Amino acid sequence: MPSVAGAPRVSVVIPAFEEAGNIGRLVTETFAAIADGDLGEVIVVDDCSADGTGAEVKALLATFPKLRYLRHATRAGQSAALRSGVLAARFPIIATMDGDGQNVPADIPHLLARLGRPEAGEEGEPALVGGIRAKRLATGSRRWASRFANGLRAWMLKDECPDTGCGIKVYRRDAFLLLPFFTSMHRYLPALFLSYGHEVAYVPVGDRDRLAGTSKYTNLGRALIGIYDLIGVTWLRRRTLKPRIAEDSRIAEDGRVVP
């Protein structure tokens, strides 16, 4: 994939918890999918896995000099792992994927092409671009639970996000770091970006089965946490006011007032 001329480099952040058998393939795919001129680094944040996740990533460090491995001392959850990676990132654009390998790294350049340039700051330019899984592979109760959750969230938050559970996203690092942090915030990023005055956009992406391991979420567990968080984010959306700055004047060194 050719590099996008003039585009800022991207830090790819991958939270992972016990994804041995998946994470190594995902890292290798990521380096193949993003042009070297666009890719600043790939950061895997290991949320205190007890399996071979860490060994699998560290075995690739010599192969990929732009690869970084961070490990939490205690398990803190996916949102905390995501934030640890963004805080450690050295480049202005963040791309994220789930560590289970179900997201497709080759979709990242398409999301980056839709993202607004951070230096522009123009109205209408998205600060976050999320993936929409056009053909979900989940079946049965998981598919119905996802549809119900997306419908309820859309009705309450009015963020027009059709697939909040899709882990592949790109966004501006500076905008993310100004958002309030809480456990499970990764599921509400479009709503939070909108609440803080940013534009968001969506691009269709692929979906595939995990090759190893099992999902760390259950329908019931996700629902109980989701309802609690949804109420909080709905309150936050309604109580957040982010006015646009219409003027910013200052005194120059020669004493003149300049805009």
Image (spheres, rainbow, N blue to C red):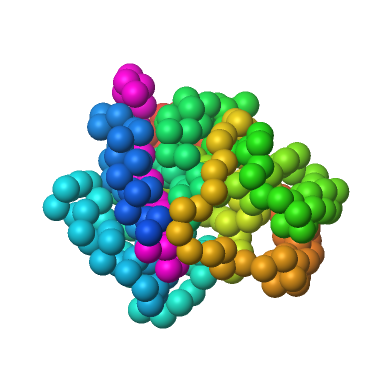
**In the displayed structure, would residue 56 be above or below residue 190?**
below
Locate residue 140, reporting x and y percent: 76, 54
The range drawn in magenta is 1-20
Q: Residue at x 34, y 41 (%)?
A: 29
Between 144 and 199, the one nearer to me in the picture:
144
Instruction: Describe residue 219's horizontal placement relative to residue 5 as left or right.
Output: right
Residue 182 visible, this orientation:
no
Residue 133 visible, this orientation:
yes
Locate residue 164, reporting x and y percent: 67, 48
Locate residue 65, reporting x and y percent: 17, 48
As for residue 100 lying within the magenta part, the answer is: no
**Quadrant (top left, top right, bottom left, bottom right) of the N terminus:** top left
Q: Residue at x 60, y 31 (%)?
A: 203
Quarter location, residue 159: top right
**In the displayed structure, would residue 62 be above or below residue 119?**
below
Q: Residue furthest left?
A: 62
Instruction: Describe residue 130's horizontal placement relative to residue 177 as left or right.
Output: right
**In the displayed structure, would residue 35 be above or below residue 224?**
above
Instruction: Describe residue 73's horizontal placement relative to residue 144 as left or right.
Output: left
**In the displayed structure, would residue 196 be above or below residue 142?**
above
User: Chief secondary structure of the magenta span?
Assistant: loop
Locate residue 229, reporting x and y percent: 72, 66
Q: Residue at x 20, y 46 (%)?
A: 64
Q: Residue at x 72, y 66 (%)?
A: 219
